[in-house]
Amino acid sequence: MKKEEIHLWDLKRIFFGQAPPEFLLEVLVRSLIIYVTVIIIARFLGKRMNGQLSILEKSVMVLMGAILAVPMQQPDKGLLQGIVLLLGILLLLRGINWLAFKNKRLERVIHGGTALLIKDGELQLEAISKAKVSKQQLFTIVRSKEIYQLGKIKRLYMEPYGIFSLYEQEENKPGLSVLPPNDEDLTEHLKETAAQACCNCGHVETVPVAAGSCPRCGNSKWTTAVIS
C-alpha cells in the first residue's frame, strides 16, 4: 500500500481493510472451519495440552497461533494450507514424543528432569540455582501447604513441567522458619528450640555453632531453629 493512499479519515479502510465488506462473512466461515479443525487437532495432541505444558508443547501452541491467523484473515490465502500445517504439527509432536519414549536421554533433553530442591529440611542450593528458583519462591510454595518451617519437609521436588511435589516428614523436626520476618501474627504456629538453623541452607545444629562453620555451605549467619 502506497503512502499517499493512507488517510486517517478513511474509516472504510480502517474497519474493513482493502477487502470488500462481504469478506467479513467469509472470515466468520473461515474461523468456524479453523476452530473445528483446531479442536480435532488438539484432541489428537493428547491430554497434556489441557494441563501443564512442556516447553515443546508450549512451542507448538505458539506456532499454532501464528499458523491460524493467516488463513482466517487473508482473502488470498486458502484454508487448506493452514490445515496441512496443523496436521504437520500433529505428526511432528507425536513423532518427537514417540522418539522420547524410546530414548530416555532424548526424553530428558526435551522435557527436562525432576529437581530435588529440599531434602530432609535442608535447601539444595546447587539444584535451586540450576532450577532458577529463588528461596522466597520456595518458601511461598511451602507456606501454601500450611508448613511454616523446613524441618517438616522430607522432599520438595520441582517436576519437569514446573509444578512442585512436597512430602512431609513423619516426625516433626526443628528447622529454619519460612515465615516472613516482619509478620509476627503467625509466630503462634512455631516454637523456638535450643537448636540453630543456617540462614542460607537450613542446616540444623543442636549445639552452639561458631561463626562461619556451617558444614554444608560455610555460611556465618545462624538463627534459632523452630518447631511447629
Image (cartoon, rainbow, N blue to C red):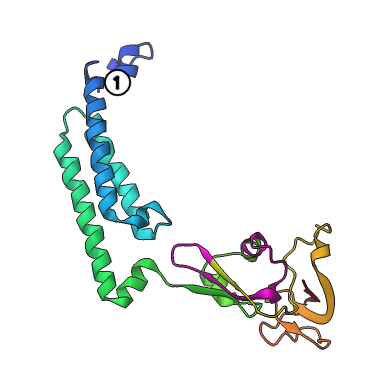
- Compared to residue 208, the image places residue 72 above or below, namely above
- Frontmost residue, 210 versus 52: 52
Residue matched to label 1: 3
Q: In x, y percent, where is residue 218? A: 70, 83
- x, y (%) of residue 63? 30, 48
Q: Which residue reaches farthest front?
A: 170
Number of numbered tags placed on the structure image: 1
Q: Quadrant of the N terminus?
A: top left
What's the residue at 75%, 63% (across, down)?
A: 179
Residues in magenta, as a range: 141-164
| Quadrant position of residue 118 | bottom right
Classify mark 1: helix, strand or loop.
helix
**Image side of residue 129 versus residue 3, left or right:** right
Q: Is residue 204 left or right of residue 133?
A: right
| As drawn, 14 above or below 89 | above
Amino acid type of disc 1? Lys
Q: Relative to residue 45, is residue 226 drawn left or right?
A: right
